[in-house]
Image (spheres, rainbow, N blue to C red):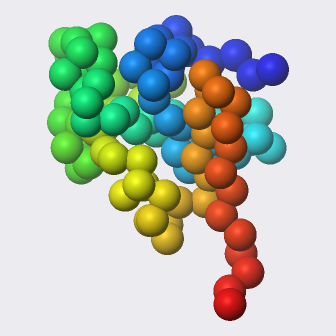
Amino acid sequence: MRLYPKLVCKLCMCFDGWLVGSSADPDNKTPRDYDIVISPANWSKAAQLIPADAKVNSFGGWKCVSEGIELDVWPEDLNQLLSSAMIKFIYHPRSKTLYRRSNETS
């Protein structure tokens, strides 16, 4: 079982956050950063956990550092996220649900 920084745990467990990209890859034991998507319905409460020194990121959310590791946190609907061709991994720590995009084309 992988241990996450406290802020990652709070965002994922309390606000139904999803890890995206390399931090969601089960083979990547030491991600360089964490990308976390929060449902727009939970965003206003989740955003209150973001440190005051956070910067606005390109996704309309926040970039901050927690326990020495960078986090990007933004609001997005899960359906939109799943339809993105750029995303290879999406992981929901609370339910232990992993989506892995296939490399196969039809």
**Residue located farthest toward the bottom when viewing the structure as drawn:** 106
The residue drawn where x is 65% and y is 64% is 101
Question: 81 or 55, which lies in front?
Answer: 81
Where residue 98 appears, as percent x and y from the top left, is 68, 43
- Please tell me which residue is depicted at 31% across the width and 45% down the height of the picture: 76
Tell me where residue 103 sits by quadrant. bottom right
What residue lies at 44% left-to-right and 35% top-to-bottom?
A: 36
In this orientation, which residue lies closer to the viewer: 55 or 102? 102
Residue 22, image x, y percentages = 61, 47
* For residue 3, above or below residue 96: above
Quadrant location of the N terminus in the rendered image: top right
| Quadrant where the C terminus is found in the figure | bottom right
Q: Describe residue 49's horizontal placement relative to residue 71 as left or right.
A: left
Q: In which quarter of the image is residue 38?
A: top left
Say left or right for 65 vs 99: left
Q: Position of residue 19 (x, y in %)?
A: 53, 37
